[in-house]
Image: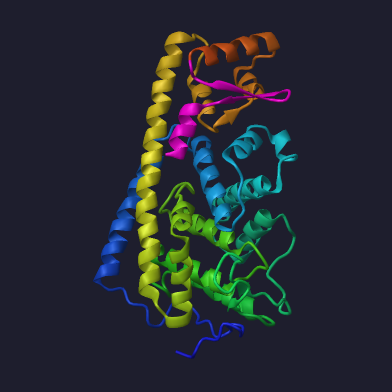
Amino acid sequence: MKKFDRNIPYNDLPDLPPSDIIFDKDILLKWGIASRALAELNRNIMRIPNPTMLVNTITLQEAQTSTAIENIFTTDDELYKAVSDTLREEATDNATKEVLRYREALWKGYNTIKSKNKLDEATIVKVFQQIKNTRQGIRPPQSQVVIKRGQSEFKPGEIIYTPPRGTGVIEKKIKNLIEFLNDHKKYPIDPLFKMVIGHYQLEAIHPFTDGNGRTGRILNLLYLVHQELLSHPVLFLSKYILNHKDDYYANLAGVTTRNAWKPWLNYMLTAVEIMAKETNQTIDEILSQMQATHQHAKGKLKWYSLELNQLLFSQPYIKPRKIGELLEVRSRTTLTKYMHELTDIGIVSPHQEGKEVFYINNDLIRILKS
């Protein structure tokens, strides 16, 4: 392997598939365990009465955590309030807007994959554009993009990686990546392995001026959906990456500098296994709580419906207006009465902020924070 120089554009980044990757018994065992956990998660998603509505709650956590990996933070309170009212989203802080754009990019990418039935360069670019709220595409050949150490790290500002650069270079490498992911006859590798390998390759290509990490993490989920390993993009990988952030970047660098594929494969397959199990548990707890809440409320309130129960578990904070729209209640007095009744029996609790009132599903928040 040619000696790697972090200060020189890595135009020698090898095409996929890797020539010397080793699928030994340890990795194959890890793959088997991760695949089984992923299949169990997919089966569990089918238990959800309205997957899209409930998945919104889970993807919100993924969006928040993936954005936090890039040191962009927002509080649960600000995020939940913004999501509860589309009018409020326009007035929220920049960090919260970044999280909301991430979730929107995930759903737009999901809908694109389902409608086009393929993962192509246009889809990747659209995901990036939604995340960054930009019309930029693949970074131009003259762009002097480098990766530097953070200010809190040893030797802050030091260049640790210079991605490929030059006329047509990035486009060629993206084309190879897409062919590797989609052509199973030419590259007969299991899709889960392809996702892991492809994630490294996209990060190494670093095709955009910013937002590459978030774009790559969304593409992980889109690819699993495209390959029918998941019906919906609910695998909460960003939480594992955030909790093991140093290992994530060290293993990425290990592939680049030493062709150390095994630690990278092991890391990502472990992430899939652990987070598939954890997401499964979250779904189980939400479904169990939904059932308990519905039984409790239905015994107290004759007007309480299954549809309302599902709405209350679609997001942690909710505005009365949305409940009124669902129940087709136009009278403010009647809607206020309903909200008081929901509060009195402990289904929600009110949260006043200025003239606005949000109603909080504390049981849902408890589950999401566990």
Q: Is residue 328 left or right of residue 36?
A: right
Task: Tell me which segment is drawn in magenta.
Answer: 346-370
Q: Residue furthest bottom?
A: 2
Q: Position of residue 278 (x, y in %)?
A: 37, 46
Q: Position of residue 5 (x, y in %)?
A: 55, 86
Q: Position of residue 335 (x, y in %)?
A: 64, 13
Residues 39 and 70: in front is 70
Q: Is residue 279 left or right of residue 178?
A: left
37 w.r.t. 211: above or below: above
- Residue 352 shows up from this direction: yes
345 in the magenta segment: no
| Image point (49%, 90%), residue name | 3
Q: Quadrant of the C terminus?
A: top left
| Image point (71%, 41%), residue name | 92
Quadrant of the rendered image containing residue 77: top right
| Image point (37%, 82%), residue name | 20
143 w.r.t. 300: above or below: below
